[in-house]
Image: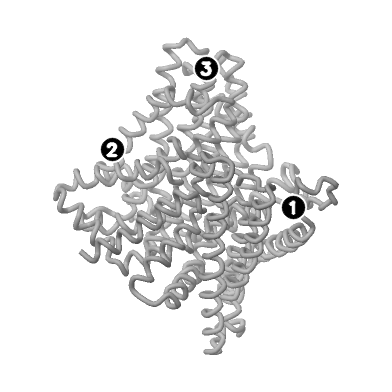
Amino acid sequence: MEDYINALVLFGSFAFFMVLGVPIAFSIGLASVVTFTTFMTFDQSVFIVAQQIASGLDSFTLLAIPFFILAGHIMNRGGIAMRLIDFAKVLGGRLPGALAHCNVLANMMFGSISGSAVASAAAVGGVMAPLQEKEGYDRSFSAAVNIASCPTGLLIPPSATFIVYSLITGGTSIAALFVAGYVPGILMGLSLMLVAGIIAKRRGYPVAERSSWREIVETGLRALPPLGLIVIVMGGIIAGIFTATEASAIAVVYTLFLALVWYREISIRDLPSVLLEAAITTSIVLLMIGASIAMSKAMAFADIPYMISDALLALSENPIVILLIINLALLVIGTFMDMTPALLIFTPIFLPVVKDLGMDPVHFGVMMTFNLCIGICTPPVGSALFVGCSVGKTSIASVLKPLLPFYGVLFALLLAVTYIPALSLWLPRLLLNY
Amino acid sequence: MPKTVARPDFASGPGPVQRAVDAVLRVIISVIFAILVVCVVWQVVSRYVFGTPSTLTDELARFLFMWLALIGAAYTLGLKRHLAIDLLPLSLEGTAERNLRLVIVGMVAAFAGLVMVYGGGKLLLGVLQTGQLSPVLRIQMGYVYGAIPFAGLVMLFYCALSVRDILSGRDVAPAMGD
């Protein structure tokens, strides 16, 4: 009984701070302090939270996060998006609704490189929306395609999201997580293209001119330097040549070379402002991570993971049902919470449960990330939804109906990712002997 | 880096004190980040060229990272760019909204003051007292943890500014984060 009170204190105070509008990182930290005070003195509580933030941030693995973010920011400054979009156009050209396919493909490539769904939605959507409008596409349809497909880059590696997951789970292999993201991420893009194609065909959206081989080769070559980043980073990680942190540093050097020397799109004088922007994005994530480390300690003190596990097992002993409940819970959480905080707070709660069911932590990480990708596209709070609507010059209300078929296919694919472990684990087993 | 110019329209921008603090933090953050990049790149190079990874840059990188994360978080607070679910503040108007914003700033200040300055300060003093030195650089480990109370103080400064702005009606709603 006492356990339930502790859980109530933790979740109750957390929900209270969040609903008031206290920034998420601070809500997490304050709720942790409140929970600790039920076990120890106030002095000890604030001390242990400060100590947990310190130990949470003292990690060489975490260094990969600012570096991947910095590499993404350097890439965003240049005309990378344009080169990838040109290449995506010739790839998706002959399908009905060619520009919608181009949007999805460009998001898959750009999202993978920039590692940010929001940056991808802004960069790709910003270019594609006016083009699609010119060809007679419905504005809200174009925005819906862009919104639903921008999170593909969070699954297709390299992805800072998986680094966060690895950290909070106490060191799940980053290489395995990265490689495991490929199949679900690519399937996500392809299934969205399928739905977009069916709708476009019905509405009679135009097919693009057939591209000549020369065009394909030329645009492909132009897209090669930015795509080379993925080859170097992922090749190095898969081959075991370097760690994720080392790969992230190499990504910074490579993108700096591209931007400063190869394309000459930014100058040395622009660097301080790029560094600062990347530092801001980074610190938003890192403060949340530090506070979440404290909260997961508080949860362990309060025996919350065991309690949730008991409660779930009391509902059903059937793994299929339990995974369904976890997915539904995460979908609800995702509607109002951004991906990183949701991942940080709910991984320590659900992972012990699914581990008891014999689920692989890599598989669970992919499932959870996939689930929360849907969450950032849904109202009332969804960063991809907000940015997609703003660059697509449409409103949230009008984009919801065209989004429904995409939500449908994403949900179906989520069930497939949940119940077919091979979708996540086949590739890492093949390439890494995971 | 954008130059700060004196604005005749006083009410529309940060005051001179905030501009100065902002500028100092911007320099610190950019310099730390730049050194951090050099450190980790050197770490990779040394591992491949000399066969042994440099333990010095490894340790330095971890220290700088802690400071970057926390000073960055304090600076981000000044920009009001920490992610929040602001459905409630946005749905209120007038005095109710003003009071809620004061409560939110109060909560942030409570965390910064109690956990970061007080709790983090105790951590700092405790570690300094043990005299624990970092293995390679031989510097006091306490200084690493000093980032927490320091960032807490900067956060309290920004909270005080926010309170002043809210009370004088100059508060701008926090921008949407990314």
Report which residue position mark 3 lands on: A138
Q: CA distance from mark 1 to mark 2?
A: 50 Å
Q: Is residue A375 above or below residue A356?
A: above
Can the viewer see residue B49? no
Query: Residue type at mark 2?
Result: Leu
Residue, far bottom = B130
Q: Mark 2 = which residue?
A: A415
Determine if marks 2 and 3 fall on one subunit: yes
Disc 1 element: loop
Q: Residue A212 or A172: which is nearer the viewer?
A: A172
* Most distant residue in the front direction: B95
Residue A424, x across and y down, in percent: 33, 45
Question: Which residue is located at x 20 percent, y 54 percent?
Answer: A311
Q: Which is more N-terminal, label 3 or label 2?
A: 3
Q: What chain does badge 2 belong to? A: A
Dot 2 falls on a residue whose secondary structure is helix
Say which residue appears at 47% left-offset and 26% top-offset.
A397
Displayed quadrant of residue A275: bottom right
